[in-house]
Amino acid sequence: MSERVLVSQLKSLPDGPVSVSGWVETVRDQKKVQFVILRDETGAVQLVNPATRPAEDGSEQDAAALALTDTISNLSTGTFLTVEGALKADERVKLGGVEIKVSNLTIAAAALPETPIAADSGLDKRMDWRFLDLRQRRNNLIFRVQTTLEHAMRTYWIERDYIELHSPKLMSSPSESNAELFSMEYFEDKTAYLAQSPQHFKQMAQSAGFGKIFEIGDVFRADPSFTSRHATEFTSVDAEISWIDSHEDVARMQEELLQTAIQAVKDKHGDEIQELFGLDVQVPATPFPRIPLAEAREIVKARGYEIPRADGDLDPEGERQISAHVQEQFGHEFVFITDYHPEIRPFYHMRDEQTGLTKSYDLLFKGVEITTGAQREHRVDVLEAQATEKGLDLAGIEHYLDFFRYGTPPHGGFGMGLARVLMLLLGESSIREVTFLFRGPTRLAP
Amino acid sequence: MSERVLVSQLKSLPDGPVSVSGWVETVRDQKKVQFVILRDETGAVQLVNPATRPAEDGSEQDAAALALTDTISNLSTGTFLTVEGALKADERVKLGGVEIKVSNLTIAAAALPETPIAADSGLDKRMDWRFLDLRQRRNNLIFRVQTTLEHAMRTYWIERDYIELHSPKLMSSPSESNAELFSMEYFEDKTAYLAQSPQHFKQMAQSAGFGKIFEIGDVFRADPSFTSRHATEFTSVDAEISWIDSHEDVARMQEELLQTAIQAVKDKHGDEIQELFGLDVQVPATPFPRIPLAEAREIVKARGYEIPRADGDLDPEGERQISAHVQEQFGHEFVFITDYHPEIRPFYHMRDEQTGLTKSYDLLFKGVEITTGAQREHRVDVLEAQATEKGLDLAGIEHYLDFFRYGTPPHGGFGMGLARVLMLLLGESSIREVTFLFRGPTRLAP
């Protein structure tokens, strides 16, 4: 293991013997010379071998050289191998300005000769063979960007004394609603439900006096939607903080968090994103613009789009319109929509005493909703009244209500879909492209 | 929000007006003076109020002072409140050397007068009221330690260019075995299974050319065990790396990782762990001791314990014995047990060509197994033969086998139970104590 050199390190090495390992991207098998493009997790390098072909006149030849040429001729795309050879700087080589003259080649695992997908195969076909699809540089970059984005968020929180939570995904009662719920048999004839969000538990952490928490974890929705933004399982980024005055305290934390995380992505991967996705990562300025929902609807209407919803909310086209407006007016990719009516919000959102509207927001990024945030109602009598008003059975949320009966501070938080953020950040068209292994109504494998 | 001062900051502030928020830990309601211990997420502080009682002779009194005294008399333990007052340094106050003379007190949410548990309630009762149980300083510290431990591990990996994975928990086929599996109805009459480990997917990432990955996420086992080490849902810490020569490369990474992470815990929380758990965190020296299984069994036998297992593995008492031996001989809390027979290992563990034993290890910490690690078999023909030998139906692991048909590098990794590490690190008796919300055969709520 110790002798292996990463492709990215080759440029800084002097000419001489090296050993690199990776998979075969292409083979150019010319009569007198063979070229192999070998890729590892850090880049690609050209291997070169002067071909030794069987002599037509039957004269004696170097058996090892013949065998090496034959091996290279028969390499399948995707074969993982280790090569030893002589590294040589050569300005004429477009790929990194170096090449390796092969002296020895060891196949770790050969690939079948027929690769079932190509880079331009349809999305569904590529998802069938996701592990091959992920060998593309562009796809590999997506997950390195995700890693950087997440680590920057966690570091932001940890520097501010947040506690990281791992809340259970198996629950005895629904977390958000009875709809779109996966259920299964548990022990002793009990039924377990898969958590649709860590909502209950992150609020519980406030009653437990944790103060500030975050969780990046799996949530599950038995959602039959086939849109580019929905999945039956996804990674949710959640935070919850105590002693807030309103949802504004949550929004301020979230905009600073996103600014920090996107800056980290730009710093580390900006050039590569430019090269492979053709876009410049924009680090958002704070504060993000804020627009009350009623005003947003007026703006969308004035732009000529009539939202065909009776409930007063925006629809996807309305979200695109208001984001386009914000981009034109403020040059900003993000916008907080605020002041939602209680009818279109869950029972646990706190309501403003003056306006009767909820102390909550949606955050849109490039025209797509990525977050709902809110101050939660922490007064148990008000909470019970709001739940009853929504037609909820109080017995079904008994454990949840208990959190508020033994003291709890005013608190609020947000939930954010990681794949949506990544999709929009990289200008991709679907969360399927930016999820390691997507899960949907017709997609449960591989 | 901005005016709130954390209790931990009080010591460094000059005498004068402050506002702190937290929950009531105790009230001492004396005739002439009232004391409240108020706790927030950073510590506890004493509030003091000169009591104003209704005059027996009916003379006029300050109504606000009377009301404040009455409010404090009626405070329940657990009530969350904000207090404004005058901070005063006073060496005689044992709790931090400061106290706050109350001028104004606002109740955010009152607690019911009867708290359903006490610090010395039984574990099951405390788990029923986990959010109250977690208000104890000791329990709060557990999750701050967990946060530090995890962040140090992730930082170790990210500094070494690992990619963070979020693999799906919903699967179309079992990940490890057909036993102890939760299953549920999915769309179109399909059955979904909950992942018992990210094993398949972290290996898939190697075929995808990711090189080095880690994941900290949920796994599920329909395990009817009631031991102190088992749960039906737990957080698994997983890593997988390519281009290894043997399981030794994995072991070396893991020991360095643990050394780094435990050092971070000691640096940040060592004093508090000493105070609340009565133990000194030991940062392990590397390399950790390694003992082949056969030799370990001999040592255990020589210590007078005959392992009552026919399959040649250690049992829990055997693990305690060998760890005791290592502690006595080498003064080390960790030990790698190596060279397991294929019969007691999964089909995908690579076997040593000379000995026929698997290239795998278990890692014990203070006498308890916390990890299995191994080099994986990456040659598809050998893998199929080993699966068939174990009686597996190859059709059932078809997607898994595909990963090895299109090229894959030699690779290996480990899985580690986060709660077990935390339990042992803090000298706790059960993973129930160190899990935010434990899930077991008879425990699905709150």
Image (cartoon, coloured by chain):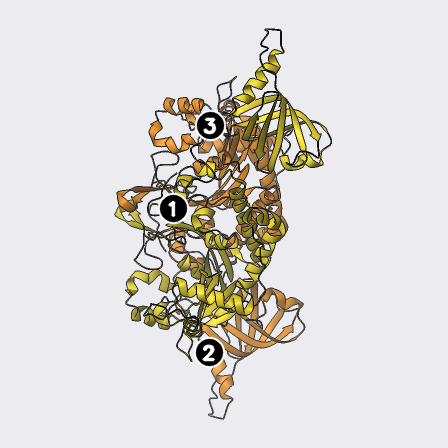
Chain colours: A orange, B yellow
Q: Secondary structure at mark 1?
A: loop
Q: Which residue is mark 3?
A: A349
| Mark 1 or 2: the one toward you | 1
From the viewer's perspective, tell me whether residue A163 is left or right of residue B179.
Answer: right
Q: Which residue is mark 2?
A: A71
Q: Secondary structure at mark 2?
A: helix
Q: Is residue A134 visible?
A: yes
Chain letter for mark 1: B
Alpha carbon distance from label 1 to label 2: 54 Å
Q: Are marks 2 and 3 in contact (CB under 8 Å)?
A: no
- Tell me, yes or no, whether dots 2 and 3 are on the same chain: yes
Q: Are marks 1 and 2 in contact (CB under 8 Å)?
A: no
From the viewer's perspective, tell me whether residue A1 is left or right of residue B173.
Answer: right
Q: Are marks 1 and 3 in contact (CB under 8 Å)?
A: no
Q: Which residue is mark 1?
A: B439
Q: Residue A47 location in percent, x, y? A: 56, 73
